[in-house]
Image (tube, helix red, strand yellow):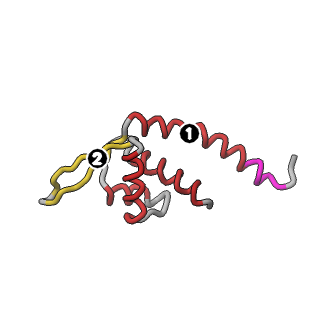
Amino acid sequence: MENQMKRGLLDVCVLAAIRDEDSYGYRIVKDLSPYVEISESTLYPILRRLESGQMLTVRTAEHNGRLRKYYHITDSGIERLKQFESEWKELMQIYEFVTRGGEK
């Protein structure tokens, strides 16, 4: 898969993982694992990019004596997910066209 497309898909996957409740890195990886393979070393640059794009915010809280970063989706992040849903419909039409074989 083209890197740019995969990057965009991973971004929306991360946003979807925190849509309903705040989460932290390891849990996001765990929540995504049934759907997409992503490592923590791949996740953290995505989180930083989404934060700089104002699609999520970060807060730090103590957990078991250590500081943990929790990520929260913003209104811009929710809008990105809605935009993806619209884009996905178009991608599915393209997929159907490409995979239809010789059918017309």
Q: Which kind of residue does numbered mark 1 sit on?
A: Glu
Residue 93 location, quadrant: top right
- On the rendered image, what quadrant is the N terminus found in? bottom right
Residue 101: x, y in percent? 82, 55
Q: In the drawing, does residue 68 fall left or right of residue 11?
A: left
Q: Residue at x 32, y 57 (%)?
A: 25
Asked whether the beta carbons under mark 2 and mark 1 sit within 8 Å of each other, the answer is: no
Q: Secondary structure at mark 1?
A: helix
Q: Which kind of residue does numbered mark 2 sit on?
A: Val
What's the distance in space between the residues labelled 2 and 1, CA to CA? 25 Å
On residue 12, which mark appears? none
On residue 85, which mark appears? 1
What residue would you read off at disc 2?
58
Q: Residues within 10 Å of mark 2 (few under 14, many from 20)?
A: some
Residue 83: x, y in percent? 54, 37
Q: In the drawing, does residue 27 fall left or right of residue 64?
A: right
Q: Residue at x 37, y 59 (%)?
A: 44
* Residue 87 sits inside the magenta stretch: no
Numbered range of the magenta stretch: 96-101
Residue 29 or residue 46, whichever sits in front: 46
Residue 19: x, y in percent? 39, 42
Q: Residue at x 72, y 47 (%)?
A: 94
Closer to viewer: mark 2 or mark 1: 2
User: Which is nearer the N-term, disc 2 or disc 1?
Assistant: 2
Majority secondary structure in the magenta region:
helix
Q: Residues within 10 Å of mark 1 (few under 14, many from 20)?
A: few
* Residue 100 sits inside the magenta stretch: yes
